[in-house]
Image: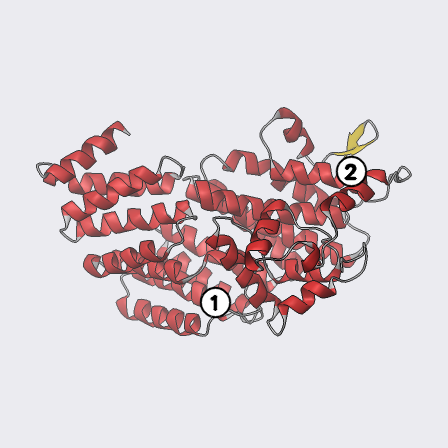
Amino acid sequence: MAASPHSPNSTFRRLRGQRSPAEFAALVRRAAREIGETVSCDARYIGRVESGEIRCPNYAYERVLLHLFPGRTLADLGFPPREAVRGRSAQRTPAPAPAHHRTGPKESDVLRRAFMAGGSATVAAATLGLTLLGDTRRLPSRAGEAEAAAVEDAVRQIRLLDDRHGADALYRRAAEPLRTAYALLDAGSARQSTEDRLHAGAGELAVSVGWLAHDSGRFDDARSHYAEALATARVAGDPGLEAHAFSNMAFLARDCGRSREAVRAAQAGRRAARAVGSPRLLSLLALREAGGWAGLADRKACEEALSRAHTEFSRGPGDKDPEWMSFFGEAELESLEARCRATLGEYARAARHARRAADLQDPHFARNVALYTAELAGDLAHAGAPDEAAWAGGRVLDLLAEVQSTRVRSMLADTARTLAPHRRSPRVGAFLARHASA
């Protein structure tokens, strides 16, 4: 029986069975990968469905859920007909909201679309944090649940687009939603729970936009966004967000050649992460620390950090893993170790890890496939395997047709320079010619 507008979806809850919300969310994400969809399903989403807050899933989730439960309809999963949900929304004509009240359904839809799309002049105006109240566009005097949800949706959408296409084309467009998020945060909320969601959402959005700047080679911008996220985390007393900001700051410091800073940022992140209770988060921070130690040529400290990373990773995923860590699986673990090995000059060993990372990565995440394959090409070139490196480099060029990443292109350029002395090899020569034309 379908859930009523405000009643829990008990049918969906029964389908989850004995699994935790996080475990069930992992099943949903796996089903999505099986059919080429990407959904950012987490324990919070499952909770929103079961509570009845999400009355009908969007079309991507519908396809995934029907694949996960073959032979069933949305009604069998406890959802009302989509047209019924839309019909009730369309028929409702609320009185104009007072100026101090949060935006209503129509206004929240405008905000949500503005966050999710971006690009045109109309959307750019909307993403400045303006809402439609009659014919007047202005910031709400108080932010509500709809605005908090819009910020969270923006974070998820940016991550999905980055996974598929890389950062270069996204960075400028993502700056507007970030400004909106902080404007909404500044407007405040009547409820502490909404205020907490806005702080977490704005901080995560700052990290995401910082990452887009980082991946597209705008290191100063990235540093500023990460610092903004860290400040937001500390104001809100949010250790998970603080650990995330420090993790990215350590990564950025390593890429900028500031290895000591990378170590210290990773260690600060580890201190914050202890309050989160996620072994996977501790594993990632240990890998960030290992990268810093490798940059300092401290092999012993690097090995110790790598050992900690593998130990924590082996504990498996858990309910307390942050949503943003969905990218951190075995492929990323192998890739980060490959970078440490390469930094220490162990190129053959690095190539083995990079190859495993590329093989393990879900092909739907084209940006990471390109990144790991570019790492493999560079490691093979330095390890004295020019023909294999040229093959891997050619594969990266294929992927760059859909991935826009300054970082990947820079890595490939380094590989091309390393392979230049081997241009008489037919395979290397073909790769170099193709790279030059690209």
Badge number at residue 280: 1
Task: State the colouring used for the structure image.
Answer: secondary structure
Tell how many labels. Answer: 2
Which residue: 27% across, 67% down? 299
The image quarter containing residue 321 is bottom right
Answer yes or no: is residue 104 visible. no
Amino acid on which disc 2 is placed: Lys
Residue 106's tag is 2
Q: Quadrant of the N terminus?
A: bottom right
Secondary structure of the residue carrying tag 2 is: helix
Give the amino acid at mark 1.
Arg
Percent position of residue 389, x then y: 20, 46
Compare residues 315 and 239 and report the one nearer the observer. Answer: 315
From what the image shows, is residue 274 above or below residue 42? below
37 left or right, relative to 145: left
Residue found 28% across the figure and 42% down from its top? 395
Query: How many residues crowd around disc 1 within 10 Å: few (fewer than 14), some, or many (20 or more)?
Result: many
Looking at marks 1 and 2 on the same chain, the residue that comes earlier in the sequence is marked by 2
Residue 115 lies left or right of residue 436; in this view the side is right
Camera-nearest residue between 293 and 71: 71
